[in-house]
Amino acid sequence: MNEAVPVSRVTDRGTAKLMPDVDRERAWLLTVDGAPQSYVDLEEPTHLEFEYARRLGHLLDVLAEPGAPLDALHLGGGALTLPRYLAATRPGSRQHVVEFDGGLLELVAEHLPLPAGADVTLHAADARAWLEAAPDDSADVLVADVFGGSRVPAHLTSVGYVREAARVLRSDGVYLANLADAAPFAFLRSQLATLATRFGELALIAEPGVLRGRRFGNAVLAAAHRPLDITRLSRATAADAFPARVEHGPALRDFTGGARPVRDEDAVPSPEPPAGAFGIG
């Protein structure tokens, strides 16, 4: 019997490692420079190990009728966890993945191949540059999970970026993003204000402890021109092993407060996580 062994490679943006999970056969953890990036179970692509990934998965589940294919654009590739999930839960979906680190894409394609029949096209490119060249009205969902190291790059936080995302999405399309912040949430509030310049419906999913300012953590945002299924979404997130809360409507507007949209010339990366916030080992 062949035993899975860790793989390490210096890629375009750092040192990537694939480490097998001793508890799940054919499951792997991807880290870059020691920070966990993705978890993939090749036998069970619907298994989402990371809490933020499960929350994005819940959103993908409620965007359309169960099993209906979607045209999806993923900014940030990692180990292609969510493209695998969408291919399994919505067969026939057409997906594009944009990842700046071409070496990382090569590593993942070599050691964690996509399942046969998955319509996923990989692009080694800067996320915003690729987005600006993408055709109008070409995506049902855009998933942004881009971190340069441990921070969201500044050029993916501004009104100009959100304008391009809205242009590429269809009229009933939905924008999803994984962000990270801590109290007093200056970055997260600014992102909500920035998304509100183009989208009328907003929702935020995060653990209560993060929202109460007890720790640094992930927050998943959703933005659309149409109502989201908040009831179904709230049930799904509350049933997770680490339950999360869904904020929307007046409560979310109160949370955003007087935050202002971010102009390109004022954009800054997301805050640096405190030491040990996302590390392993």
Image: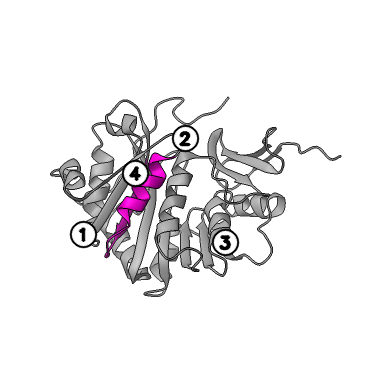
- Residue on which the image places disc 1: 197
Residue at mark 2 to residue at mark 4: CA–CA distance: 15 Å
Q: Is residue 33 visible?
A: yes
- Residue on which the image places disc 2: 241
Give the residues in magenta: 219-239
First in sequence: mark 4 vs mark 3 = 3
- Residue on which the image places disc 3: 87
Disc 3 crowd, CA 10 A, few/some/many (<14, 14-19, 20+): many
First in sequence: mark 3 vs mark 1 = 3
Q: Is residue 18 depicted above or below 88 in this figure?
A: above
Q: Marks 3 and 2: CB-CB under 8 Å?
A: no
Towards the viewer: 120 or 164 = 120
Q: What residue is shown at x 26% (from left), y 54% (from top)?
A: 202
Disc 4 crowd, CA 10 A, few/some/many (<14, 14-19, 20+): many
Amino acid type at circle 3 is Ala
Amino acid type at circle 2 is Ala
**In the drawing, what numbered circle is on residue 205?**
4
Disc 1 crowd, CA 10 A, few/some/many (<14, 14-19, 20+): few
Residue at mark 4 to residue at mark 1: CA–CA distance: 20 Å
Q: What residue is shown at x 41% (from left), y 75% (from top)?
A: 135
First in sequence: mark 3 vs mark 2 = 3
First in sequence: mark 1 vs mark 2 = 1
First in sequence: mark 4 vs mark 1 = 1
**Location of residue 42 in the rendering, given as x and y in whole percent from the top left corner:** 67, 49
